[in-house]
Image (tube, helix red, strand yellow):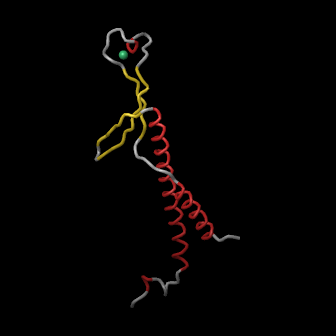
Amino acid sequence: MATRLERYERSYRALAAELAELRFISQGSVVVRYTTCGKAGCRCQGDPPRRHGPYYQWSRAVAGKTVSRRLTEGEAELYRGWIANRRRLEEIVARMEQISAAAGELLLRQVSPAKAPWAAKR
Ligand SMILES: [Zn+2]
């Protein structure tokens, strides 16, 4: 039967392997917009209104400000994939930190007080 520490190690290695396979990442989000224009009688001001779009935008915060970039539908698909990869990256790292903290507690308990670095030099 696997010890708790072995189970932690196995879970950690599985996450590290997934991390190694992860493709490109991107911050921010993809926004889809429909707009109205100022042309009199345009369909976007009709009843019901049929607004222009969809227009795709990639938005992210740069130094506290939102910066946007216009995208085609195909580019928006790419960004959605990269953004999903980044979310997965963050989940994986958070899980690795949890496992490391739990394994760390076990390892600290295994170190005999006499050998522990903090108990050394007297
Ligand atoms: Zn219009």
Residue 108 pos. (x, y %) = 51, 76
Q: Residue at x 43, y 10 (%)?
A: 47
Q: Residue at x 40, y 20 (%)?
A: 52
Direction from residue 49 to residue 7 in the image, left or right: right
> Quadrant of the image for the C terminus?
bottom left
Height in image: 54 above or below 85?
A: above
Height in image: 40 above or below 89?
A: above
Residue 3 pos. (x, y %) = 65, 71
Residue 82 pos. (x, y %) = 47, 45
Tell me where residue 13 sits by quadrant.
bottom right
Height in image: 93 above or below 74?
A: below
Nearest the viewer among 15 and 113 is 15
- Which residue is outermost to the bottom? 122
Residue 8 pos. (x, y %) = 59, 66
Tell me where residue 34 sits by quadrant.
top left
Direction from residue 33 to residue 95 in the image, left or right: right
Q: Residue at x 32, y 13 (%)?
A: 39
Height in image: 83 above or below 98?
A: above
- Which residue is outermost to the right? 1
Which of the four quarters of the rendered structure image does ligand 1 lie in?
top left
Q: Residue at x 35, y 8 (%)?
A: 41
Q: How many marks?
A: 0
> Quadrant of the image for the N terminus?
bottom right
Direction from residue 63 to residue 54 in the image, left or right: right
